[in-house]
Image (spheres, rainbow, N blue to C red):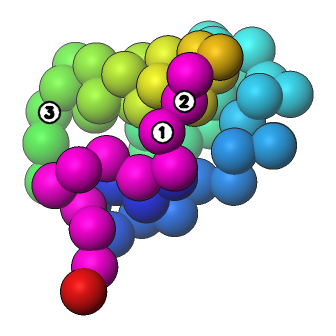
Amino acid sequence: MIVEGVTFNEEKVKKMKKRDFIDSHKGVYFLDRAIEEREKVLSSIYDDIASPNAPKQKKDDCIL
């Protein structure tokens, strides 16, 4: 899944626990935002990937 130019490996994300995913990425990506906002974004990304109907890309991140 690609979100705001950041690619997340879906298979690896699915193997992680949500808290581990957030903790390991919040100090690396979306650094232009407050820590609380980064955690919300990463939580949403995890939920999108871990759900059974996970999209390959979010609509607003399509590259032409």
- Secondary element under disc 1, as helix, strand or loop, is loop
- Secondary element under disc 3, as helix, strand or loop, is loop
Amino acid tagged 2: Ala
Residue designated by label 1: 55
Q: Nearer the viewer, residue 63 or 33?
A: 63
Q: Which badge, 3 or 2, comes first in the chain's sequence?
A: 3
Cα–Cα span, label 3 and label 2: 26 Å
Q: Which mark is residue 16?
A: none
Task: Label the magenta part by its dominant secondary structure.
Answer: loop
Camera-nearest label, 3 or 2: 2
Which residue is at 51% across, 63% downward?
7
Q: Residues within 10 Å of mark 2 (few under 14, many from 20)?
A: some
Residue 20 is situated, as x and y percent measured from the top left of the image, at 69, 21
Amino acid tagged 1: Pro
Amino acid tagged 3: Ala
- Is residue 46 at all visible to an observer of this figure? no
Residue designated by label 2: 54
Q: Where, by quadrant of the figure, is residue 2 drawn?
A: bottom left
Position of the C terminus, as image quadrant, is bottom left
Camera-nearest label, 1 or 3: 1
- Residue 14 vertical position relative to residue 12 in the rendered view, above or below: above
Residue 17 is situated, as x and y percent measured from the top left of the image, at 75, 14
Which residue is at 28% across, 79% downward?
63
Cα–Cα span, label 2 and label 1: 4 Å
Determine if the magenta segment contains residue 37: no
Q: Which mark is residue 34?
A: 3
Q: Which residues are magenta?
A: 53-63
Q: How many marks?
A: 3
